[in-house]
Amino acid sequence: MTDHNPAYADACERCGQYDVVPVAAIRDGDTGIVAGYRCPNCRAAWTCGWGIVPGRTIPPQPGPAFPDQHVSALLHEQAAVNRAHKHTARQDPA
């Protein structure tokens, strides 16, 4: 099977730019990532969740010297929201 998106690329909703590759990603459990994007055309920033596909290279995690603080903050915020949802879903209803 041919992987039509080997780089976890996404499209910008603001300007329509296709094939925007993530600048960084954070693991979301064992099977997923939250990827952070910065459009090279209009500079919009966003995140997108993906299931990890074997053979695809996972983008690097943003480190202390990561230059795009806005994308880093979006990544960490979305990862925290995902963890909260998973934690809430695991709890038994009272």
Image: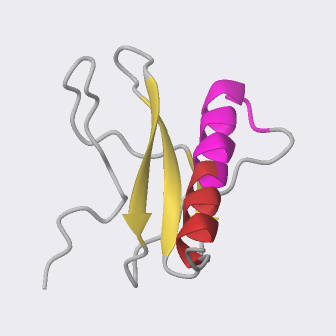
Check the image and name the residue furthest to the top: 42
Viewed as shown, does residue 38 lie left or right of 3?
Answer: right
For this rendering, which residue is in front, 67 or 84? Answer: 84
Q: Is residue 3 left or right of residue 37?
A: left
Residue displayed at 49% across by 71% down: 32
Q: Is residue 76 left or right of residue 7?
A: right
Residue 41 locus on image (x, y percent): 34, 18
Quadrant including the N terminus: bottom left
Residue 86: x and y in percent read 56, 68
Toward the front, the furthest residue is 94
Q: Quadrant of residue 4?
A: bottom left
Q: Is residue 51 left or right of residue 67?
A: left
The magenta-colored residue range is 66-80
The answer to whether residue 18 is above or below residue 45 is below
Answer whether residue 17 is magenta in the image: no
Figure quadrant of residue 50: bottom left
Which residue is found at the position 63% from the left and 69% from the top?
Answer: 87
